Every structure is written in structure tokens, then in C-alpha cells.
Amino acid sequence: MQPQLITDYRDRVVPALTEKFQYRNLHQVPRLEKVVLNCSVGSQPDRKQAIEDAVQELSTITGQKPVISLAKKSVSNFKLREGEPIAARVTLRGRRMYEFLARFMFIATPRIRDFRGLSPKSFDGRGNYTIGIADQSIFPEIELDKIKRNLGFDITVVTSANTDDEARALLKELGMPMRAGGKSSAGEEGAEEQSEAA
């Protein structure tokens, strides 16, 4: 069975965006391409254990095994050696991407403490949206009594939109809970402290 978000996109979002932006061709309508979750543990003192925790948590949240990113060069100030694991990353596409986004938008974000909506400014100028999450406990898949450490991570939603306005309209139509107002300026920092959460 297809995720509800795919059906919503096809039946409701596509006609709404076509009318708003006067697209002449169905293929001009912006669509979601992928969702990337990235968790960096470079600042943790026990990186080896932290990377294992990050892999475990991301696997639980997304249902997909993360790829481990290695340091490209040594930095003595950070006690970092070349080739040392420093981050875990998951790229979601297709069905898993839509299922994850639905869980994030409708179940996880309302659990953020003092949540007043995501920043409408966190676009990169090319139609991609980045959200900073300070605490993995907002996801219902995570058992609170098993959390060993707070792991912050970024969620980047990559769209086929040519402009930030089109991407913003796409995400709002899909149900992304954004605060009212605010235009993005190209190159603006992703994820304002959206999670004053944890």
C-alpha cells in the first residue's frame, strides 16, 4: 500500500502548485528527491562509542543502515586523526522517504518542547531545506530509558524546485509545520535553533 503522503502529493499538492505557479507542464511541478539525515559526533570525547550510538539511533529512526563518514585530515586541536569515524549519514528515497517525512511532520515535531513551528528561512537558495534537531527523543521509535546520550542531527529535504519560494510552497502543502512569514535569503544558515527543544 502506498504511503498517504504520496497520494496527497499526487491528488492535492500537484494541482495546488500548478495553479499557484502556473506551470504548463506536469514535470515542472517541484517534487521531493531525497531526505538526508546527518549526525556528527566529532565533538564527543568517546567518538568510537558515540558513532556506534549514532548508527543505532539513526537505524531505529529511519529503518535504514547509516553510512559512516571518516575524517579527511588530522586536526590536532580536536584530537582528530585522519580516517577516524566522525559522523553517520542516511539518505532516504522513494517510499521510505515519504514514510519518514510523514512521521517527522505529524508525530515527531509536535513532541518538541515549546514548539511554535519550523523556521521558514532555512533554505539554501536552491530549493533545499535543512532542519536542526537537538534531541533524538522526539521520535516515538526511540525508547527514552535506553538513550545513552543526546545526539543532535540535521535533516535536509532535497527538492527539485528551482527557487526557495517553490520549495517552501511544496513543503507547506505537504504539511510541514512552518512558522508564518519569513522569506529565505540564499546561503542563509540552515536550521535556526528550531529545537530550543532539549
Image (cartoon, rainbow, N blue to C red):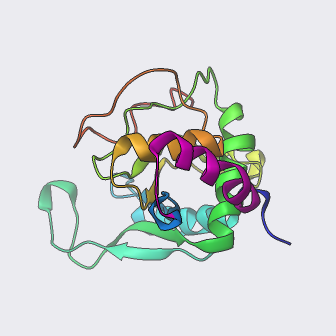
Q: Nearer the viewer, residue 188 or 11?
A: 11
Is residue 131 shown to the viewer in this render? no
Q: Which residues are magenta?
A: 6-25
Q: Residue at x 44, y 59 (%)?
A: 158
Percent across and percent down for residue 155 are 48, 53
Q: Residue at x 44, y 21 (%)?
A: 181
Q: Nearer the viewer, residue 14 or 121?
A: 14
Percent across and percent down for residue 39 are 45, 58
Q: Residue at x 57, y 27 (%)?
A: 117
Q: Is residue 17 magenta?
A: yes
Q: Quadrant of residue 182?
A: top left
Q: Quadrant of residue 70?
A: bottom left
Q: Nearer the viewer, residue 109 or 15?
A: 15
Q: Is residue 10 left or right of residue 130?
A: right
Q: Is residue 12 left or right of residue 183?
A: right
Q: Is residue 167 left or right of residue 138?
A: left
**Dominant SS type (magenta):** helix
Q: Is residue 124 magenta?
A: no
Q: State the quadrant of the N terminus.
A: bottom right
Percent across and percent down for residue 66 are 53, 74
Q: State the quadrant of the C terminus.
A: top right
Q: Residue at x 36, y 73 (%)?
A: 69
Percent across and percent down for residue 38 are 44, 60
Residue farthest along the right direction in this orientation: 1
Disc tally is: 0
Vertical relation: 118 (above or below) 70: above
